[in-house]
Image (cartoon, rainbow, N blue to C red):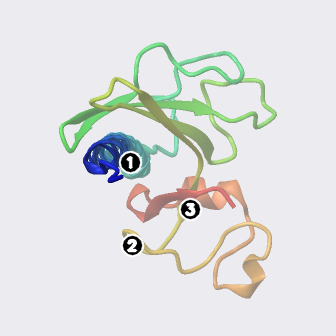
Amino acid sequence: MRLNNHGVALVTVLLITIVMMIISTLLAHKVIQSSRSSAEQGLKKKSYYAANTGVEEARRLLATSYNSTTFWGNVLTVAAAGKYPASPTFTTTVDNLAVRIFVRDNNDGDGDYTRDNDLRVFVLAEATGADNILTMVEALCFLKPGKGKGSYNGQYGQGAAKTSHSDGGVEDVVNSTVTDYYISDAQ
């Protein structure tokens, strides 16, 4: 007696086809999910870099706006500890993203948060990406006296005996010209 194997072959081919379709669907889903994740990461990186650039822009603006009589009185507007102003101190646009920059005094011990006395301020930059996610970068910035724009060739205050500068501390900085400053991360 001959067995009819044609039906078994058809069922086997159908099962293999269904399994391959399921594997193909799962693979396509993973590829799409990975593409979306990569796109989201790209948007997050873009807003992070925009906020980071905002901090750098604030450093430049703070270095040029420092005044030896009012210090940063023109940008320090909040009289409470640890609070940023409600409206941004500076705004800029980076790669078509709006960046809001806020400046506040650190706790320098004088109790007056509208006047700085230790040449350190906090800078907060906010950038909202195309995905509407807010990215914030905060830095404690320090005003460093230098010789010319963008250079730092010595120090004032403690350890100044190692350089050609005096050790008068903040008084030396106050008596220096405004063009001799740049902003860096606090040390």
x%, y% of residue 109? Answer: 81, 34
Say whether residue 110 is left or right of residue 36. right
Decide: marks 3, 1 in contact (CB < 8 A)? no
Mark 2: which secondary structure? loop
Mark 3 sits on what residue?
144
Of the residues shown, which amino acid type is indicated by label 2? Gly
80 relative to 51, above or below: above
Tag nearer the camera, 2 or 1:
1
Decide: marks 3, 2 in contact (CB < 8 A)? no
The CA span between labels 3 and 1 is 30 Å
Of the residues shown, which amino acid type is indicated by label 3? Lys
Residue drawn at (46%, 60%), measured in percent from left and top?
182
**Residue lying at the far top of the rendered structure:** 86
**Front residue of 101 and 112:** 101
Nearer-N-terminus badge (2/1)? 1
x%, y% of residue 183? Answer: 49, 56
Q: Number of labelled discs?
A: 3
Mark 3: which secondary structure? strand
Nearer-N-terminus badge (3/1)? 1
